[in-house]
């Protein structure tokens, strides 16, 4: 009991100093070295960790990691949070114990669970230092400038830990091929603008941002040059959208993604936006907020997002 109390005290003291990460900006790809008797040394988003061979009691604090592990055919022991959208719904089953939330782990439950591997990323990356005191921990970096490369690197990293390298190779090869095919269409069909709407406010995102995959990897030309590659985008109004006059308007309704009453359609249905080419041609694309916002850099989520964009472009063939 005293040992658990000490662990919890150290964790609590450290927690207040953590900050949420910005998207990775061309960071070195995570790698896993050849295994030894002690385990496998893994280089990841926040350093290196020695993880056991064939870990069994895996606790995951990241939806991206869950997406990738599911695609690789790897099951987990426990998860965090209560919201598992879309294809991640199976993790909502009671057979997966809850270890707190993505933002605030339940350290007492986690200590009692005795995990042999913890995986963090995105919303939980700020808790990496605390969690790594309890068990070997691997942190998945977020995608930024090199969004697709980060998705691939994270997939290959987790595959190397669980002996799923061949499965990862197939997944990555298929994803790259399908994205390359999409770019053949998007590159010559006009410029696009990516916006997120929440609480009645609009933010715009450019290349290198958390939604930069639309431009950088899917190949949609940029309608608004010079947007900062920040995590939260740049706050804009409908006047900005009219001024940039995108041929395609990609919309993420954050409120809908969080299970709240989505208002993006109402916010954008106004006289200024009506003047844009995107609105006039019916080329306003409401991206699935689960895949675009909540899950983000999971290899399945990216492929589903690609499929949605490809399907929309096909429906508006010239």
Image (cartoon, helix red, strand yellow):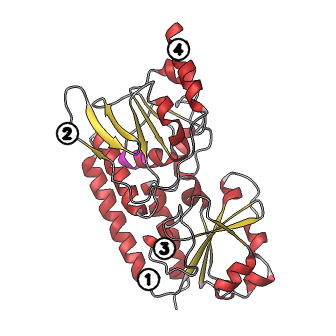
* Residue 307 within the magenta-colored segment of the rendering: no
For label 4, count other residues whose C-alpha is less than 10 Å away and answer few (under 14), some (14-19) or many (20+): few
Which dot, 1 or 2, sits closer to the camera?
A: 2
Reading the image, the residue beneath label 4 is 6
Which dot, 1 or 4, sits closer to the camera?
A: 4
Q: Measured along the vertical axis of the image, is residue 169 above or below residue 2? A: below
Specify whether residue 1 is in view. no
Q: Is residue 54 left or right of residue 100?
A: left
Return the disc, 4 or 3, that comes first in the chain's sequence.
4
Disc number for residue 40? none
Q: State the SS at label 2.
A: loop
Return the disc, 1 or 2, that comes first in the chain's sequence.
2
Disc number for residue 215? 3
Which residue reaches farthest front? 17
Return the disc, 2 or 4, that comes first in the chain's sequence.
4
Disc number for residue 34? 2
- Disc 1 and disc 2: Cα gap in Å? 41 Å
Q: State the SS at label 3.
A: helix
Q: Which residues are magenta?
A: 69-73
Residue at the spot 56% in from the left edge and 68% down from the top edge: 228
Q: Measured along the vertical axis of the image, is residue 68 above or below residue 136? A: below
């Amino acid at each position: 009991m005293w040992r658990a109390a000490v662990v919890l005290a150290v964790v609590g003291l450290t927690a207040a100093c953590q900050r949420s990460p910005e998207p990775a900006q061309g960071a070195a790809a995570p790698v896993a070295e050849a295994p030894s008797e002690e385990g496998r040394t893994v280089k990841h988003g926040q350093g290196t960790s020695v993880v056991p061979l064939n870990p069994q009691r895996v606790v995951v604090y990241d939806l991206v990691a869950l997406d990738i592990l599911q695609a690789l055919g790897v099951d987990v022991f426990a998860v965090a949070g209560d919201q598992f959208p879309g294809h991640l719904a199976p993790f909502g089953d009671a057979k997966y114990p809850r270890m707190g939330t993505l933002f605030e782990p339940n350290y007492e439950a986690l200590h009692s669970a005795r995990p042999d591997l913890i995986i963090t990323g995105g919303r939980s990356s700020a808790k990496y230092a605390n969690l790594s005191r309890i068990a070997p921990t691997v942190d998945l970096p977020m995608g930024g400038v090199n969004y697709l490369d980060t998705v691939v690197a994270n997939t290959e990293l987790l595959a190397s830990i669980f002996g799923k390298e061949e499965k990862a190779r197939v997944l990555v090869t298929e994803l790259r091929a399908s994205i390359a095919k999409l770019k053949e269409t998007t590159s010559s069909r006009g410029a696009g603008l990516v916006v997120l709407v929440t609480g009645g406010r609009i933010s715009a995102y450019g290349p290198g941002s958390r939604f930069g995959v639309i431009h950088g990897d899917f190949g949609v030309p940029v309608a608004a040059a010079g947007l900062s590659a920040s995590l939260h985008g740049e706050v804009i109004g409908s006047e900005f959208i009219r001024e940039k006059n995108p041929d395609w308007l990609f919309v993420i309704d954050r409120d809908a993604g969080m299970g709240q009453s989505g208002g993006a359609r109402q916010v954008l249905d106004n006289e200024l936006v009506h003047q844009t080419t995107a609105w006039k041609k019916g080329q306003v694309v409401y991206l699935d907020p689960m895949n675009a916002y909540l899950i983000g850099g999971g290899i399945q989520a990216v492929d589903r997002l690609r499929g949605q964009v490809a399907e929309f472009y096909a429906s508006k063939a010239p």
